[in-house]
Amino acid sequence: MGPRKRKGVNDMSAKKQGMVYVTTLQERIVHWLLAGSCLFALLTGLGLMFHSWDFIPALLGGHYAMKWMHIFSGVVFAFALVAASVMWWEHCKFVPDDLKWAMQAGGYLWDAHDLPPGGMYNAGQKLFFWTVFVFGIVVIVSGLIMFNPLAVPVVLARWAYMLHAGAVMVIASFFIVHLYLGTFGNPGTVQIMFHGWATREYCEFHKGKWLADREKKDGEESQAA
């Protein structure tokens, strides 16, 4: 998620007064591929792990079919994670203001009127990104070992199964919090990942530094033109 020039933003902004174009179509597609593949892999993984969840394989054509669906969703997750890392790496680097934001819980738990101007993503979103990135790598590598556990030492195979399950639990826990804060906990956020637009008031409060930097850059480009 490195800084890129967003083509047609000025034209679209003219059509939607009071709105700011925040995410590109490419960013939204990668976001939903990452989220969707993660959720589907979690669902099929539960069906593979617990016999009491037999209704999942029953809905998906049996255990054998579900196993390959699980593997395929893992492949999609791996590619989406690579794409997300390329796009969002720069925006998710921690800066000194993130500590101040975290000390005030971003205003989620109590009123905070002196939060530092935010970048494209706040400290909580950055933490979620790095959690998915680090533990996602653990899931992918351990999943590759689990695909053919007889090809590695038995101790390594056992560790792979434990690390796979543990990493999934961490990601799932953070995902639940992310889902709540992106919807009910922070109104105005979820539509950014549906159509890319947010109100100017939302951006001034949550992404003040990012908005100021972008408008300054747009102004410089207009003058140069």
Image (cartoon, rainbow, N blue to C red):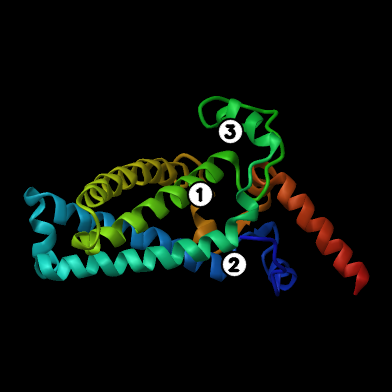
Q: Crowdedness of circle 2 by 10 Å Cα count: few (<14), some, many (20+)?
A: some
Residue 20: x %, y % from top left? 67, 59
For label 1, the SS is helix
The residue where tag 1 is placed is 129
For label 3, the SS is helix
Cα gap from disc 1 to disc 3, whole angstroms: 16 Å
Cα gap from disc 2 to disc 3, whole angstroms: 25 Å
Asked if the residues shown at circle 2 and circle 3 are in contact, with their CB atoms under 8 angstroms apart, the answer is: no
Residue plotted at (68% across, 40% down): 95
The residue where tag 3 is placed is 106
Q: Crowdedness of circle 3 by 10 Å Cα count: few (<14), some, many (20+)?
A: many
Report the side of 24 relative to 53 (left or right). Answer: right
For label 2, the SS is loop
Residue 186: x %, y % from top left? 51, 42
- Between 212 and 187, the residue placed more toward the observer is 212
Which amino acid, mark 3?
Answer: Gly
Q: Is residue 185 above or below residue 43?
A: above
Which amino acid, mark 2?
Answer: Thr
Quarter of the figure that contains the N terminus: bottom right
Tell me the tag on residue 24.
2
- Between 71 and 110, the residue placed more toward the observer is 71
Tell me the tag on residue 69.
none
Task: Tell which tag, 1 or 3, sits nearer the viewer.
Answer: 1
